[in-house]
Amino acid sequence: MTKFLFLSMALCISAFGFHSSLVYGTFVKNMYINWGTRHSAFLGNGDDAVLVLDRYSGSCMVSNKSFLFGSIEMQIKLAPGNSAGTVTAFYLSSTGDKHDEIDFEFLGNVSGQPYTVHTNVYTLGHAGREQQFYLWFDPTEDYHNYTIHWNPTAIVWYVDGEPLRVFRNYLSEGIPYPNLQAMRIYASIWNADSWATRGGLDKIDWNESPFFARFRRFRARGCEYDGPLSITQCATPRPANWWNSLGYSQMSHEQQAQMNRVRDKYMIYDYCNDIKRFKGWLPGECFKSQV
Ligand SMILES: *[C@@H]1O[C@H](CO)[C@@H](O)[C@H](O)[C@H]1NC(C)=O
Ligand SMILES: *[C@@H]1O[C@H](CO)[C@@H](O)[C@H](O)[C@H]1NC(C)=O
Ligand SMILES: *[C@@H]1O[C@H](CO)[C@@H](O)[C@H](O)[C@H]1NC(C)=O
């Protein structure tokens, strides 16, 4: 499972800047390209973005602001055709060696084969909490809504409003949870053909390049980080922080049923079932309710 060690190599580091208020907006007002400036563009009035991968470079965009909790959406249309070896990512991350991170990654595949949606959580630099899914549609045909909902109680990954996965806060029982470090929002495309497709067997076919990943309707509604006081302020259920409210801390029975259906049908890999990898010592959260 060493391939998983490389998943966050495309972390794009940048300096912090603190503000406070709610953000609702577009790429041009809220994000910038921090590598691959010649392999990326904000289009139209700045509500659309394209990231490009060819044999020379990939690219990455990052939000100017950082957040501690919130609901972050991106509509994404992935590179069609033979995308084997490419990874397109949409993720939240803090900086430093002991960083926290919440990932949506799309692992390319050969023509006619499905992309793998890879999800993961890092706490203080430690990952190893992978769950992977196929999608119930072709993600290269149209834009779809990918949302990360993060609050002090739980992280939920949604695809077109359907919950795929929950990671709940069991810090009180000694299970790590990201709730102290503010995160920026990133999207990127890069060459990961050493591991991404069938463990690295399928390499990028550069004759198929350039690969285009398209993004639109980026929406970050969250608690902006404004220094250490934010750690408590952002965690309070005050009305402005609607993403912390009870309705977003516990799934309804209907949502639970929806998630179970998705997981039954489309889940490919769950670290909590990988007893061999953990030599029988599965992480603590695997024994806890995750709804
Ligand atoms: C975002 O940050 C970048 C890099 O520091 C800067 O060039 C850009 O003007 C900033 N954009 C906004 C809207 O603040
Ligand atoms: C995207 O999905 C999230 C999570 O279900 C939802 O809150 C949001 O309204 C959706 N956005 C759009 C534009 O449909
Ligand atoms: C690509 O498709 C094949 C066949 O369905 C599958 O085994 C593989 O897991 C898919 N995804 C990746 C990233 O290899």
Image (cartoon, grey):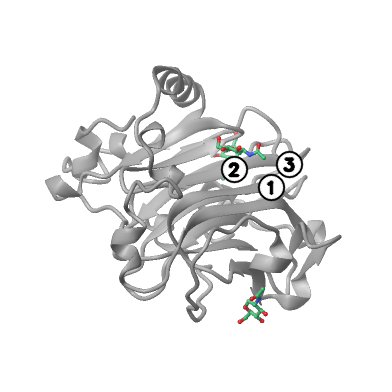
> Is the C-beta separation of discs 1 and 3 under 8 Å?
yes
Judged from the image, the secondary structure of the residue bearing numbered disc 2 is strand
Q: Which mark is residue 143?
A: 3
In the rendered image, which residue does mark 2 sit on? 146
Q: Is residue 65 above or below residue 260?
A: below
Horizontal arrangement in the rendering, residue 51 relative to residue 108 (left or right)? right
Q: Most extreme residue toward the left, as rendered?
A: 173
Residue at 41%, 36% in the rendered image: 248
- Which image quarter has ligand 3? top right
> Is the C-beta separation of discs 2 and 1 under 8 Å?
yes
Q: Which mark is residue 76?
A: 1
Judged from the image, the secondary structure of the residue bearing numbered disc 3 is loop
Residue at 39%, 28% in the rendered image: 251
The verdict on label 2 being within 8 Å of ligand 2 is yes
Q: Is residue 200 visible?
A: no
Horizontal arrangement in the rendering, residue 24 relative to residue 46 (left or right)? left
Residues 106 and 222: in front is: 222
Q: Most extreme residue toward the front, as rendered?
A: 239
Residue at 18%, 42% in the rendered image: 284
Q: Mark 3 belongs to which amino acid?
A: Tyr
